Amino acid sequence: MEQTVEQKLKALYELQTIHTKIDRIRQVRGELPMEVNDLEDEVAGLETRIQKIKNDLDDLEDAVVTRKNLIKEAQANTKRYETQLNEVKNNREYDAISKEIEIQGLDVQVSEKKIKELGYEIATKTQVYEKALADLEDRRKDFELKKAELGTITGETEKEETELTGQAEQAKKNIEERLLFAYNRLRGNAKNGLAVVTIERDACSGCFNEIPPQRQADIRQRKKIIVCEHCGRILVDEQMVLENGEPQQVA
């Protein structure tokens, strides 16, 4: 059976009332879900960063060990060459072995310099590592607190929200597809989520612009669907509030 305009308006207003209650519940949660997600991402990011710094420190420590081994090897070679000096038979052999001893000495100096540079880099990176660990600990605490707070709020409202969501789905079945599409578009564009609003003090309660007397009279007759000339919201009369209950506006 074809719905009358009045029935259509009542169905739209009923859906709006349900959605406003859902919005009010979600408003209590506020930005907590976003904050929890951001903190979770921050914790994951810090964990990744810390692991990278740890890997870098391990590589630097390995480089120090390598350099120390090179020094030991060069020192061993120097002792061997010094022994050979006592057995040389001519100046050419003496010069060649002396050159090798000099090269080993230079290798030791280069490695010692590199070890100092690596030590400075390790000390600097260790400070960054320790600060990142402290930051991670703080972020984890913040995350756990916010997560617990969100869990408490969600636990208190989850049942009600689930019931209201079910009511909203049921209410949608009483609205033709064309009107439901328009309703969803209006609701999506409205900052406060209101697509259906009432007349309040001779004005649209959505944008607060004045509604001409004749237009108010047309709205009260419920013979056609009328939208606000300024904000485009669907308008219903004050009596609809008494009949269905008024959806409190969500800021």
Image: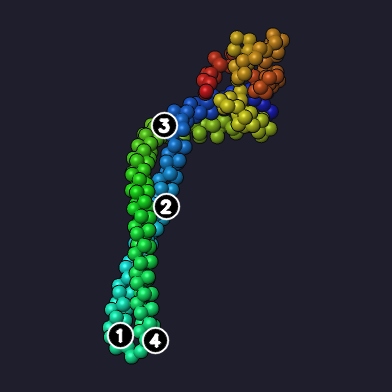
Q: Which mark is residue 218?
A: none
For the point 32% across and 68% down, the residue is 68
In the displayed structure, 27 sits above or below 93; it is above
| Residue depicted at 35% across the width and 55% down the height | 120
From the top left corner, tell me how far across and down residue 84 is, in percent.
Answer: 30, 85
In percent of width and height, residue 60 lies at 37, 61
Q: Is residue 58 left or right of residue 28?
A: left
Labels in figure, total: 4
Residue 157 is marked as 3
Using the image, determine if residue 74 lies above or below residue 215: below
Q: Which of marks 3 and 2 is in front?
A: 2
Asked if the residues shown at circle 3 and circle 2 are in contact, with their CB atoms under 8 angstroms apart, the answer is no
Cα separation between marks 3 and 2: 35 Å
Local SS, label 3 = helix
Q: How crowded is mark 4: few (under 14 residues within 10 Å), some or many (20 or more)?
A: few
Task: Specify the amino acid type for callout 4.
Answer: Arg
Q: Which of marks 3 and 4 is nearer the N terminus?
A: 4
Q: Which of marks 1 and 4 is in front?
A: 4
Q: Which of 182 and 192 is in front in this view?
A: 192
Give the mark nearer the N terminus: 2 vs 4: 2
Which residue matches tag 2? 48
Note whether residue 132 is visible.
yes
Instruction: Give the residue type that dot 2 points to.
Output: Thr
Q: Which mark is residue 92?
A: 4
Instruction: Say which residue label 1 marks.
Output: 84
Q: Based on the displayed image, in which of its 4 quarters is residue 178 positioned? A: top right
Q: Is residue 174 visible?
A: no
Residue shown at the point (34%, 77%) measured from the top left: 101
Q: What element does badge 2 sit on?
A: helix
